[in-house]
Image (spheres, grey):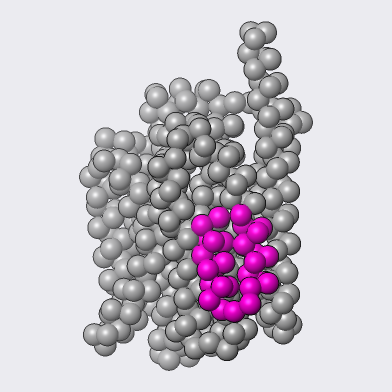
Amino acid sequence: MKMTSLFLTLSAFAISANAVPPLISEMVATTGIEAPNFGFFIFIQYVAFSMVAFSGGYLKKKWRISNYLIVAIGLGCITFSLISGGIFLHSYLSLLIWVIPLGLSGGAVETFASIEISNLSSFDSSKNLCLSQVFYSLGAFSAPQIVYFCLGFDMGWKSIFFIFSVISLLAMIFFLFSNRHRLKLTQSTNELHLQTKEVNFKSQNGQNLFILLLLIMICYVIIESLSAAWLSYIFKHKFHLTTKDAALALAAFWAGVTSSRLIIVLLPSRLTLWPTILVSSVLLSVATIVILLAPGHIASIIAVGLMGVAAGPIWPVIIMISSSVFRSDKKTAIIIGMGALGFAVGPLLGSLIINAGSIQMFHYTQILVSLLLLLLIITAYFVNGQLSNAYLDHSKLI
């Protein structure tokens, strides 16, 4: 039940994180804020997210706060932010002030829910984290559908924010009920025991692997956010499609992401870490090249689906590798924060490329970043092998 409650918190977070984009047109009409400015607000939201992830691991370790308490506080803040957003958002300044706590609370929920899921999982398997990201994908997919449904009943965006807040509140109530015995100010004896087993990799290889995982995370999330933000626009202008038909590209991407995360759950555990991320990175590089060379929009959309399948497991596998190698909530939180920073950078990078008027450059950027990602993952694989051998040699001496 506690694992289910953690999964559902990620769905609630995904809904809150994706609350603004489908409502931009409605908000522009009533607030007078120009649509392009919302890209800046979303950027600030994910920078705030990364700030919590970067600092949260350190503060958690210093004050020995339990992951469950941090997640519960984050859910409460998300609920309050959504309610207050429906009441007070009426100007540029109020939106800027509002989006910061939304990002901070979202960072607390996803970072420490994911860390707790990895702590509850076997160190040689990414199955639970992949399944948790399926719940995230479902939440991200649900947000625009809820908006579409509510607008059909002529509900305003403020009322829709209230609907989102109710969903977050229900997730918080279920989380509190499921984990009422775990909501302690300090970590339990078992959590502290696990923390004392934190692997101290201060060797050069350990530091190199940590830096490589940071770079792998930011490269992956740049590809994901670049694709999520701009694929529909690119396909519409490249193949002269309608908005509706161009949206199929984005739908294919997220369908691929979700399906591959489900597939990982069915694989043997030994295949769900390095074998999965190595195969995924190869497929991702191939898919980005095929998208560039595909003769028509149908072939390109199929290639985008393949790209989604390749991309799906990478984020959870990175987190699980960090957790299994370092066994440090602080290090894993920093890696998640780097991902949030990449998610903030990706859409802005796409905006710069598109403003330069080059659709081909967009594809070249995807290819270059995916090839860089592949190179980094291969390098990390060999560094991890050296690190494991050194650790086994040290264990024999003990």
Q: Is 287 colored magenta in this rendering? A: yes
Most distant residue in the right direction:
204
Q: Which residues fall within the magenta stretch? A: 283-310
Confirm whether residue 337 shows in the render: no
In depth, the one of 133 and 270 nearer the eye is 270
Left or right, residue 178 beside residue 48: left
Q: Residue at image x 70%, y 42%?
A: 378
**Where is residue 59 shown, x and y percent of the image?**
53, 41
The image quadrant where one finds the C terminus is: top right
Q: How many marks?
A: 0
Q: Residue at image x 27%, y 59%?
A: 169
Confirm whether residue 245 shows in the render: yes
In depth, the one of 362 and 320 nearer the eye is 362
Q: Residue at image x 64%, y 17%?
A: 392
Q: Is 110 colored magenta in this rendering? A: no
**Where is residue 88 shown, x and y percent of the image?**
38, 77
